[in-house]
Amino acid sequence: MNTSNGTIDWQAHRSEFPATERLIYYNNAAVSPMSTRVREAIDTFSNDLMTEGYLCIERAFERIAEVRAAAARLIGCSAEEIAFIKNTTQGVLLAANGIRGIEGSSIVMPSIEFPANVYPWLALEKKGAEIRMVEPEEGRITAEMLIDACDGSTRVVTVSAVQFSNGYRIDLGKLGSFCRDKGIYLHVDGIQIVGMLDIDVNELKIDFLSTGGHKWLLTPPGTGFFYCRKELIEEIDIWNPGWTGVEYFWNFLEYRQPYRKDASRFEEGATNMHGVYGLGASIDRFLEIGMDRIEKRILSITDLLEKGLEALGYTITSPRKSGERSGIICFAGSDKDPESIMQELMDGGVAASVREGSIRLSPHFYNDAGEVERFLEILK
């Protein structure tokens, strides 16, 4: 859907999201609406399975390999560093339970992480790890604050690239360089950045990244991917061994096999093929448009929302300084409680969320300036 002069036909992409016909959908940080493109991809596999059964599996495996490579291109790594997972939590579990020598070490994280990036690490206290939670200052837990919490015992820093509650974007470049220099693993919860903002795991020196697909990646719940830096693949213990994780998995009765050499060793068994087909269709769109263009469009929409909300007297509660902005923007009203504001929005056909006493908006590339105007009219 690129025009002859290289520009993006955003309206054509928008037309593939039926939710926009009746909603101003600003809730992609929760669960995104499905596009017709993704629905068609899922239906393709459903139809193949319905009419061919097992005979379509070879073709499905070829598509899985294509989607693995596409996911790798999306975040700047190689296909051998990608494993398919069912949700972000599963990826966090792979990292948390796989890292060796955790006893007596410390794990540093923000105190305001989404629970998916907390519970797997807290469970390591039973193995003798110390969990250090860094408290926010003015809604921010900066790279510098996490760095200051590290010492010689620190084994892991785990952090969301973008905070779910207020949209704060951390300086992963600074944090990644520090961790790599000190031999500390950096795990990133990527569900609030992948598909929203441009990210390169190699450039940022990220060791592990976990993301589900049902938010900014615009795919149904139940699929996602885990990135493991290739140099670490054999350093991480496999706590979830499964039959497809071994090198010759079609040799069913040959049990004493080595694990596969790449990140697919972390996939226990049958792949969620419906989910991967849908994920692939969505990632193909991101690559077609270009994540730099998607990031620019999303940030331009949040800028319009920020200016319009401030003009109406609302307070922006998201960090919005240079380098901090994301596709999440939160606001509050001085004379209205968030539940009342949320009810007004729901009555006006706006999908949004309440988080920590503020209204959280999270527009995507399929949203447009006309919606911003209609949204602001509702709040007047």
Image (cartoon, rainbow, N blue to C red):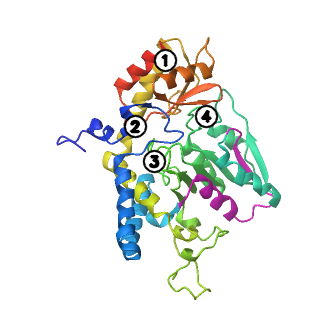
Q: Secondary structure at mark 3?
A: loop
Q: Residue at x 34, y 50 (%)?
A: 37
Instruction: Look at the picture and state if 253 lies above or below 307.
Output: below
Q: Residues within 10 Å of mark 1 (few under 14, many from 20)?
A: many
User: Counting residues from the N terminus, which is met first, the one under dot 4 or under dot 1?
Assistant: 4
Mark 3: amino acid: Leu
Q: Position of residue 297 (x, y in %)?
A: 37, 34
Dot 2 amino acid type: Ala
Residue 132 as seen in the image, left or right of residue 242: right
Q: Which residue is mark 2?
A: 19
Camera-nearest residue between 204 and 60: 60
Q: Is residue 237 above or below residue 150?
A: below
Sequence-wise first label, 1 or 2: 2
Looking at marks 2 and 3 on the same chain, the residue that comes earlier in the sequence is marked by 2
Tag of residue 217: 3
- For the residues bearing labels 3 and 1, Cβ distance under 8 angstroms: no
The segment highlighted magenta reads 85-112
Residue on which disc 1 sits: 309
User: Does 91 lie within the magenta span?
Assistant: yes
- The image shows residue 296 at horizontal and vertical percentages of 38, 35
Mark 2 vs mark 3: give the one in front: 2
- Which residue, given by chain and number where applicable, does mark 4 sit on? 165
Q: Say whether residue 269 is left or right of residue 365.
A: right
The residue closer to the viewer here, 110 or 123, is 123
- Amino acid type for the residue under numbered disc 1: Leu
- Residue displayed at 24% across by 39% down: 7
Let me know if residue 185 is in the magenta part: no
Using residue 334 as the reference point, say whether residue 351 is left or right of it.
left
Q: Amino acid at mark 4?
A: Ser
The numbered mark, 4 or 3, whose residue comes first in the sequence reads: 4
Circle 4: is it few (<14), some (14-19), or many (20+) Cα within 10 Å? many
Q: CA distance from mark 2 to mark 3?
A: 16 Å
